[in-house]
Amino acid sequence: MIKTPHKVDLPLPKRGVSDPDALAAEIMEKLTYSIGKDAKVATPHDWLTATILVVRDRIIDTWMESTRNTYMNNGKRVYYLSLEFLIGRLLRDAMSNLGLIDDIRQALSSLSVEFDVIAGLEPDAALGNGGLGRLAACFMESMATVNIPAYGYGIRYVHGLFRQQMADGWQVELPESWLAHGNPWEFERRESSYEVGFGGTVETIEGPDGEPRYVWKQGERVIATAYDTPAVGWRGERVNTLRLWSAQPIDPILLDAFNAGDHIGALRESNKAESLTRVLYPADATPAGQELRLRQEFFFCSASLQDIVRRHLQQGNTLAQLPEKVAIQLNDTHPAVSVAELMRLLVDVHGVAFDEAWEITRNTFSYTNHTLLPEALESWPVPLFERLLPRHMQLVYAINAKVLLDARKVRGFNDQEIRQISLIDESGDRRVRMGNLAFMGSHSINGVSALHTELMKETVFADLHKLYPTRINNKTNGITPRRWLMQCNPDLTDLIKEAIGPDFLDDATKLKGLDAFADDASFQEKFAAVKFSNKQKLAGLVASRMGIKLDPHAMFDIQIKRIHEYKRQLLNIIETVALFDQIRSHPERDWVPRVKLFAGKAAPSYHNAKLIIKLANDVARVINTDPSVRGLLKVVFIPNYNVSLAEVMVPAADLSEQISTAGMEASGTGNMKFALNGALTIGTLDGANVEMRDHVGEENIVIFGMTADEVGRVRAEGHNPRAAIDASRELQQALSSIASGVFSPDDRDRYADLMQGIYQHDWFMVAADFDAYAKAQREVDDIWTDKSAWYSKTIRNTARMGWFSSDRTIRQYNADIWRA
């Protein structure tokens, strides 16, 4: 029987008034009665919280109505499981989607409060690292926008990844204490708490039908408590829920130990539980780090699945109906243990037969793969997995047996093919392959760009694709134009509205109408003025944070993303060194002034990535203080990259660097954000760059370097980077100057090994692609000198990016996979 919410006899007040005077009165009311402050002594943070509470009130009615309607219709829900949700600041996002920005701004102004000042105080939610988490945030907003009932499930990290600072050019990791003063957007749901267990033993008992049943006697348990944040869709017509789990101990303090004088030991269980939700991606270079990482993943997966099954049964549905009412999307491999956990819940807790449980599980889950890097597909040592999750280890073996026997008997797989699809990797120490588990346990496996999807079939999942040839499909990523155009670039939004009308606000494909203005001199002038204003804003930020003065008339050449060798920040830096040498050697040439801007974080244990950050800062120090450069080239690495910084950098970019080694970037979404905001892309034919080229036109993007097929062939045949280096005078000199300590006089050998890696193997094809990259950069210079041609191309980039809206992506997921 379907349970419906209790009827409320007295109607709650509808907070739909958006008159600035009424809003000002509400803000004062919140300041007084919710925060307990008089306006005379209120701090900017007080005004921020009061404003958030007023905006939040306007969300709650729709949030409850959205939830209520889904309950009453008993409709299918989508559950998006992700270890990251890089949602950024929420105030401006919610105000924009509710159409409140102008009215709130006026209301605060009447109270002598400047909106931009207090909005800048809102901390970025430290719930993600890069593209994976930002994609999840875009998807949450788009699911609400296109009216899909959805929950996002993740972890409520207290400190998230880390706050990045620089110490003499080196990355230093500090805690990101975004929750230090609470989070006014979230609601604790103590009634939605679940026990999550680890370790222990598995006992076999006889079931009512005489068949053996398995009981997991957990060695330790923690409590997962839900915290809900509303996810507002465009125009506020639907509000979905982002549910994050916080870990708490069963016994917060061991009083016997405390009273015996062991005051630290008495908090052992509390500290152990809280460590689960303190940090995103704890370093897993040690056994203890690996264990914590696996504990985190199981903790949030178990709590989420218990919550999903509870909600499903509470509505009067049967477990057999789970695939009809529930669609669970695994965002990458981190939540893959969910497959085994749902099997445990069905078989052990609810008594469903194994084969039936497997059908239910497989038809409920779908899996998005975000990487072709084998190390990113995650695998866990069998002893660790078995010790921490003994019942799940049994289920992994049972699933493996079922699939491998079918592959051998029905499909005729040979030993090599069996080894490749097995859930147990036996090539070294035996490990549980989580990517294979996610694939086997899902009815749909999607890549995130056309190229990535085809490469999945040919590389990491070739044998599983042979076994299940209809499961892999493509869903090219997208971005929400609300955040990445309307909010971060309001002046450009207004200019577009003036040119083609407001229809693009509801349908991003209507941006195509801007094509007609690409060669219009008057529109180009206005477009250029908006870009210049955005560059002035970024220049102001760099001056205030770093004391570096930038010329907004120069080309702003930007690469912002996670620091990784395959993303090839190193290629960019080496070419910058070569350009530096050329400018000094040939002062008579008409050089295009450039500002090279970098931002991004390196994983704490990723030595080479951290070394690349140091190199960028060392190169910046030398170039920026060399008078012979005459201000023609500057290099800046901006610390602590996050969503808020991206919202300033993306609209200011003239050139977008998307230069990953072909075949290694699954999609990328930064490429889409830059192009939407009128930047020219320089990039390889990798990830979504391929489809971007097709949409914006090959004449409006600068493509260079080897293709994915060529990279694969060169690697297979044996790459000889030394020959490429010897054939390139500029590359040879740049590598030599870096390796010899020109940029590191305090440690001449600092970069010797990094450069030697390019000479010896050049796995990421830095040497192989250098000359093509340098030539492409000079092509960019040529385009820049013809301003009419430049703005014609960049306007067409903005006009033709509508297809890359995450609304389109979500509609495709729903039509082909979820069917909600």
Image (cartoon, helix red, strand yellow):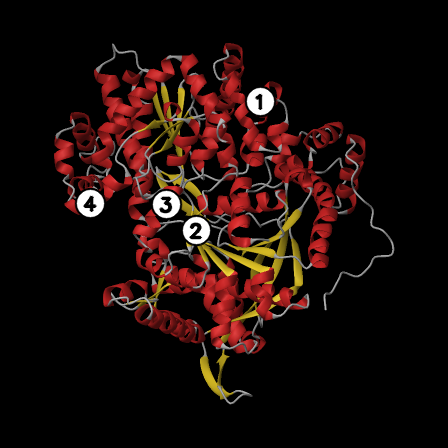
Q: Residue at x 67, y 39 (%)?
A: 48
Q: Is residue 745 visible?
A: no
Residue with the mark numbered 4: 715
Q: Are marks 4 and 3 in contact (CB under 8 Å)?
A: no
Q: Is residue 781 above or below residue 685?
A: above
- The amino acid type found where label 1 is placed reads Ile
Instruction: Give the image location of residue 107, x and y in percent.
Output: 75, 31
Mark sitting earlier along the chain (2/4): 2
**Which numbered dot is residue 446?**
2
CA gap between label 1 and label 4 equals 46 Å
Instruction: Give the image location of residue 202, x and y in percent.
Output: 45, 81
- The amino acid type found where label 2 is placed reads Asn
Mark sitting earlier along the chain (3/2): 2
Residue with the mark numbered 3: 452
Mark sitting earlier along the chain (1/4): 1
Q: How many marks?
A: 4
CA gap between label 3 and label 1 equals 33 Å
